[in-house]
Amino acid sequence: MKITVWGCRGTLPTPGAHTLKYGGNTTCLEIRNKCGFPTIVDAGSGLRNLGKKILQENGSNELCLMLTHSHWDHLMGFPFFMPAYFSRFKINVCGIQSARNYMCQSLARQLEAPYFPVDFEQLKAQFNFGCSGPGCGSCRHMKIETVPLSHPNGGYGFKFTEAGKSFVLLTDNELGYQHPGGLLPYEYVDFCRGVDVLFHDAQYTDSEYEKTRTWGHSTYAQALKLALDAKVKRFGIFHHDPDRTDDDLDRIVGELRQQAAEAGSNLDIFAVFEGMTIELE
């Protein structure tokens, strides 16, 4: 399994000198199974650059697209995903049964007038909204499990497992407040227990959270506690706040590493950055 990060920012893109290290594009991950088949998670602004890369590749023109939820920062890149404009591509939009129509509508609405000049019906790629469960037959070498997110309007986190290695993505997940449909912190611990890599929403500091509680995002301390309780092997803070600079994230990672060490843990802690690649073999 190969995980490539094309966007890890939350809320809105933040280009500029202050985000050069960790990146300014919103959420988009590319996950390749051992056969090289691509599964894309979320269609944030990072999807545009991933689409350009896919256009240049030789080989299969089929891929899977999975959405954690339909808030704008996780969809805004879809109108600029160039493979959607070419008939040679087949795009399987995968998710749980109850979310299929919702995902279809969410993607189509990104191209509605007067907000975009090209209608969804003008896209030439073959879209398949009929996948059974998360992932599809093409992803058969990679097991995919879901868990409800604690987030306004709901959503889903994902666990990818292949050849005994596992990766969990829990973006937009508020551990300090249980939203309708969301789980309690200990249930997320169970879902993440012992995984090789965890990316978890960590948008706020404790002081910021005094004002942003119920907005759908966790603090650094909450996310760290989850990672420690679940005894994950590697922990990446994710969904960086748009006001968080590279220097801010460097400082926060240092503080989290110190806190983990004081708790007697040697957990590998890092801030996820755009362009990051992790291979689990």
Image (spheres, rainbow, N blue to C red):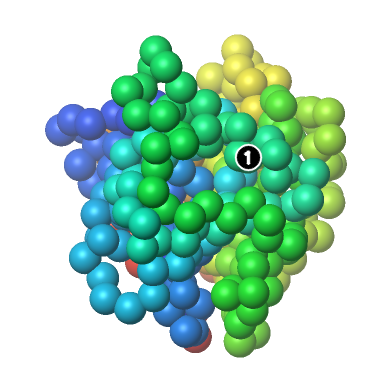
Q: Residues within 10 Å of mark 1 (few under 14, many from 20)?
A: many
Is residue 274 or residue 225 the one in the foreground? 274
Residue 68 placement (x, y as % from top left)? 61, 44
SS at circle 1: helix
Residue tagged 1: 103
Residue 220 placement (x, y as % from top left)? 55, 39
How many marks the image carries: the answer is: 1
Q: Residue at x 36, y 63 (%)?
A: 88
Q: Amino acid at mark 1?
A: Met
Is 79 situated left or right of 143 in this image?
A: left
Q: Which picture quadrant has residue 241?
A: top left
Q: Which picture quadrant has residue 76?
A: top left
Q: Residue at x 27, y 76 (%)?
A: 58
Residue 212 placement (x, y as % from top left)? 60, 17
Residue 105 placement (x, y as % from top left)? 61, 32
Relative to 23, say whether 4 is above or below: below
Q: Which picture quadrant has residue 55?
A: bottom left
Relative to 111, say whether 197 is above or below: below
Q: Residue at x 21, y 65 (%)?
A: 56
Is residue 168 visible to us here? yes
Q: Residue furthest left?
A: 17
